Image: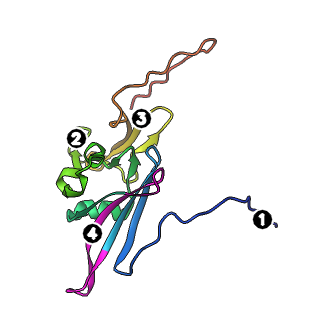
Amino acid sequence: MDVYFRYSQCEAILSESSVKEEIIAFNIDQDTLRIFLLAETFNDNSNSFDTKIFKIYCLKKRGFIFEVKIKDEPLIQRLKSGLYTLIDGHIYFNNNVIKLRYDRMNKKDSHILVEDEVFDFYYGIFQLKPGERVKSGTPLDSMRGHKMAYVTSDKVNFSTSMVRYTPYLHEKKLYLNRPKNNTDYFYTSITT
């Protein structure tokens, strides 16, 4: 069996500048062409990596455009896990959303911002029944429909799984699908 690779140009966009900083997680925001990095810095006093820094690298500008120290442990663990969907500065996971304040980051005095001024937390997008949970690994991104699909299940009442859709929370509009000419439409309704 022969394997052929198509030629593509590769270039380094980032290299760690010192041994006192280590990148521990990253993700790419495809909409804004930004790379989110979570890094740890080495503390000479404690002789360990302990300070967490959140950085944003802009692929268009080819440089770092923002960084802030973060201490919120659930946020750090979420970024480390990579179990989230990142779209236009919004981190979707479970039944929650973390919004990055791009509007504040783009200002000239953004270097003085602290963690609480950069991240806005929104919990409980859906009102869930007691025992009902959003499954791990969701929401699923439907880029064509500009929607997010959340799969929920009820472990207490042993009910069936349910899929819930919500429009993108980062867009200020709803997309309605126009009916196509010469197309027969039908709907399926399932009751349990």
**Residue assigned mark 3:** 147
Closer to the eye: label 2 or 1:
1
- What residue is disc 1 on? 3
**First in sequence: mark 3 vs mark 1:** 1
Above or below — where is 164 with respect to 134?
above
Q: Mark 4 and mark 3 in contact (Cβ < 8 Å)?
A: no
Placement of 177 over or under 24, stated as above or below: above
Residues drawn in magenta: 41-64
Q: Residues within 10 Å of mark 4 (few under 14, many from 20)?
A: many
Q: Secondary structure at mark 4?
A: strand
Asked whether residue 97 appears in the rendered view, the answer is no
Separation of residues labelled 3 and 1 (CA atoms): 38 Å
The earlier-in-sequence mark between 3 and 4 is 4
Q: Nearer the viewer, residue 152 or 121?
A: 121
Circles 4 and 2 in contact, beta carbons < 8 Å:
no
- Residue 96 horizontal/vertical position (percent): 27, 47
- Of the residues shown, which amino acid type is indicated by label 4? Lys
- The alpha-carbon separation of the residues under discs 3 and 2 comes to 22 Å
Question: Furthest-front residue in view?
Answer: 108
Label 4 – label 2 distance at C-alpha: 36 Å
Which disc is residue 129 wearing? 2
Q: Residues within 10 Å of mark 2 (few under 14, many from 20)?
A: few
